[in-house]
Amino acid sequence: MTAQSDLHSALMARAEVMVTGLSLAALWPRKGGDVPTGEHVRIYHLPNDDRAARLAGDVMQRQGYLIITLVSSLDGYQVVTEEKAGLIVGYFNRSLKLTANSTITTITSHTVRSGRQEGQRWETPIWIEYRSLS
C-alpha cells in the first residue's frame, strides 16, 4: 500500500470506531447505499496539500481534512446537535496518532462548523484536520 492509502485507511478506521461507539448510521465514500431516514453521518476524506517536507529527500508532508457531516431532523434543538457534534469530536482529539502500516497520521485540530437546513434535515459539518509525514 502507499502512504496515501495508509493515511486514508487510518482515518476511516477511526471513523468506524466513532460510528460504532456512538451507534450512528453512516454513509461512506464510494460504498453507496440508501440514505438513512434518521440521524446519521456522512464521512468524506478531503486531502489537501502534499509537499516535500524538506528541499532534499523523499519525505512528504501530507495534510487535509476528514469531514464528518452530522445529519439530523429539524424537530430538535440546536443544543442537542452541538452535544452530538462534541461527542463526535471526542473521537478525534488533537495530537491523536493514527497508524496504518508504517504511516502515522496526527490529528491537528477540529472545527464544528455552523449547521444549516438542507431540505427537511439539519446538517452540521465537522472538519477534522490531520498531518502526516511519510
Image (cartoon, grey):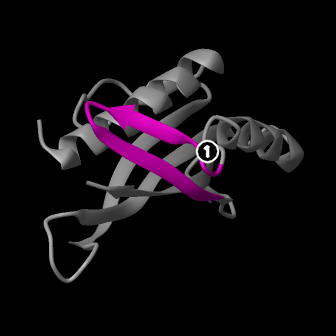
Q: Is residue 4 left or right of residue 113?
A: left
Which image quadrant for residue 9?
A: top left
Q: Where is residue 45 in the image (x, y as percent from the top left)?
A: 35, 50
- Amino acid type, label 1: Arg
> Which residue is at 74% across, 35% downward?
87
Q: Is residue 111 visible?
A: yes
Q: Please identify the dominant SS of the magenta region.
A: strand
Which image quadrant for residue 38?
A: top right
Residue matched to label 1: 121
Q: Is residue 77 left or right of residue 85?
A: right
Location of the C terminus (image quadrant)? bottom left
Q: Can residue 36 be seen in this view?
A: no
The answer to whether residue 102 is magenta is yes
Location of the N terminus (image quadrant)? top left
Numbered label tally: 1
Secondary structure under badge 1? strand
> Which residue is at 66% across, 37% downward?
88
The answer to whether residue 71 is magenta is no
The answer to which of 125 and 86 lies nearer the viewer is 86
The answer to which of 21 and 96 lies nearer the viewer is 96
The answer to which of 33 and 84 lies nearer the viewer is 84
Which image quadrant for residue 89?
A: top right
> Which residue is at 37% across, 43% downward?
104
Q: Where is residue 79 in the image (x, y as percent from the top left)?
A: 88, 46
Q: Where is residue 54 in the image (x, y as percent from the top left)?
A: 25, 78
Q: Is residue 107 left or right of residue 33?
A: right
Would you call the spot at circle 1 few (<14 residues within 10 Å), some (14-19), or many (20 or more)? some
Q: In this picture, which residue range is highlighted in magenta?
A: 94-110
